[in-house]
Amino acid sequence: MRRFALGMMTSAALMAGLSSQVQASSKDYSKRTKTDLVTKIMGDKSYQVYSSLKLEEVTKKVKTKTKKKKKYKVKKKIAYKKKGKTKYKTVKQVKYKWVTKTAYKNVKKKEWKFGKKLTKSAGFRYAHVQSKSYKVKDGKRYYYIYVDGRPVGYVNEKAFALSKANVVSQVSLVNNPSDSVGFNAEDAINYVTDKHGSLVDNDSVEISCKSAKLHISDTGYVSSKKAGTAVLTFKYGKAKATSKLTVRGDAKEGISSANVTPVKTDLPEIKTWSASDMASISSSSTITSEDAVSSSHNYWATNMSGNSKGADIETIFYHPAVLSAPGSSNLEAKVSSAVQGIDFYDNDLVTSNLDLGQADNREARGHMVYYNMRRVKKYNWQLIPSKMLSFNTWLSYIKNIKVSPYMKLGHGQSVGSTKKYVYVLANWNRSNNWSNSQELLRVKKSTMKIDKIWTFKVWNGSDKYPRIFLNADVIDDNTLIALFHNASKHRYEYWKISRSGDSFKAKEVGATGSDLISNSAEVQGFVWDSAYDVYYIAFNDYLFKIGAGLDGETEAGKLLNYYKFDTGREFEGLGSYKGELYVNLNHPTETLKVDHITK
């Protein structure tokens, strides 16, 4: 067994330690103790959240008791002799006794006073909670929390998950002798917290591997070049959790054939702009009344026949500007408004949110956000990180949002969902079509935590001709449809990837004999519309409609139409549900519905 452990202490943990020293050396807790801005993970227990916590001077009547000696006289009969006879007489004697006197006086003293009771902490269980200060009352820490970017109030630290580790219980890897990287064990972490419930950097978590055949490298990767099982143990302080990892036995799994004849197109040369050609636009991290958009966008498209009313898109929802507190500089803490991918299932909208520029990183990570669209207000949700909404209105919105832990997302545009789950195909968009395995994560909608991870591979005959998918859609809990651009042969391929248990099979189900866009622009969204059996492929401001042929309603791979929009912004993800098509734009981030689309 080899061991992977980085002993680096996070800045949050260091600050927490320094704060503990300050607490131990000082008895004046009237001032707020500041820390780094950290993410807090909510626990299962519910505690009261208060609007404020102040040490106030109060005047109280204090009961006092004093003791005093009091003199008193008593009569006592004493005997004496007179002429041989016993006589008696009464005499007075002086005695003393202690008397307690009770009195009341006004005394000034300092007492902790809670402000208004706002709500219970259980309502924030699936929100993004942060803090950068706390106060100590009766030896207990009360943290001032931000929830989805909005400053809220104080809560007992027992409301957090203290020294807890939550990891994916099962990881199943494809047997891939050509995988030069392996599986990053950190991908299995949902969260690990310190003794105060603060999120710990994944790099600070000690990871060990117990296995007869598998091992973990010094950089934390498990090779999938040979079959075997292992138990991964994740530990930080008192937080500990385990995950079972399996490398499947069939080294031929995922080897298929790209033998579909592409359908030729008669496209003219079509070019589109790239993001670098456009002016730099960024979303504000602080919303004001001037920033909030108060009207819908509506854009018409020209189709390939020249019809200027070929389709239109109209805003149905403006996303929150951010869902994290101001000053959230590190990526774990920041829930960006830069959406890379979306998907719909019924009234559930899920988005993949990566900070600007992060999608190009090999280990690109971010957050997923779930919205219950039954409760969505088109404009007001932009104001969630501000205090412009009344607390009760804001609270009603928060109950319909869930933010995932910081997780691997890859390019972020291979997102799909079913009734219970969200799926992310977390591939690197700068891999140059390598033969390494592709990582599929399943997220439970109820908690927005990863509950299962698989890897699979798709090769055309051998590892010399791999197929890495940067865009994919989910048909059901066992099936993906993935898009591959074969640039050397100037065609797009459509692959059906089916899962049985933990094993995957791949089959090419269509091909289009064209690059569609001639200047190598990247695909910005891909989806299968099940109602009409067509694919939609997005490039910046172009939307292509392709026959899927999965249900026999259309010819697989045939170009049916394309639509040119002039939004001045990139499409960032497509979603479809029961014949309805949705697109996403950033700056500001908004989801739009496609209407009047021509055949």
Image: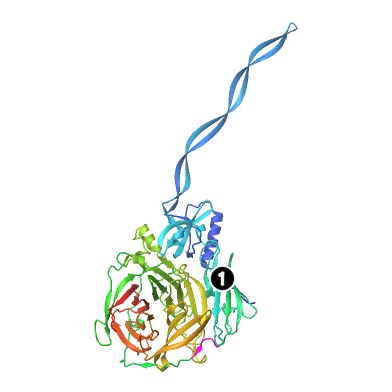
Instruction: Count numbered badges in the picture.
Output: 1
Q: Which residue is situated farthest in the top direction here? A: 83
Quadrant placement of the C terminus: bottom left
User: Residue drawn at (43%, 83%), measured in percent from left and top?
Assistant: 482
Where, by quadrant of the figure, is residue 598 drawn? bottom left
Q: For mark 1, what is the residue?
A: 205
Evaluate whether residue 162 shows in this view: yes
**Magenta stretch: helix, strand or loop mostly:** loop
Q: Position of residue 75 (x, y in %)?
A: 62, 16
**Render colour scheme:** rainbow
Mark 1 neighbour class, 10 Å CA radius: few under 14, some 14 to 19, many 20 or more: many
Three-letter code for the amino acid on which mark 1 is drawn:
Val
Q: Position of residue 68 (x, y in %)?
A: 57, 29
Q: Position of residue 437 (x, y in %)?
A: 51, 83
Reply yes or no: does residue 255 show up in magenta: yes
Quadrant placement of the N terminus: bottom right
Where, by quadrant of the figure, is residue 597 drawn? bottom left
Classify residue 496 as left or right of residue 93.
Answer: left
Secondary-structure class at tag 1:
loop
Reply yes or no: does residue 47 show up in magenta: no
Q: Which residue is situated farthest in the front direction here? A: 552
Q: Which residues are magenta?
A: 252-256
Q: Position of residue 315 (x, y in %)?
A: 30, 72
Q: Nearer the viewer, residue 483 or 201?
A: 483
Evaluate whether residue 6 shows in this view: no
Q: Nearer the viewer, residue 67 or 39?
A: 39
Q: Is residue 239 above or below residue 175?
A: above
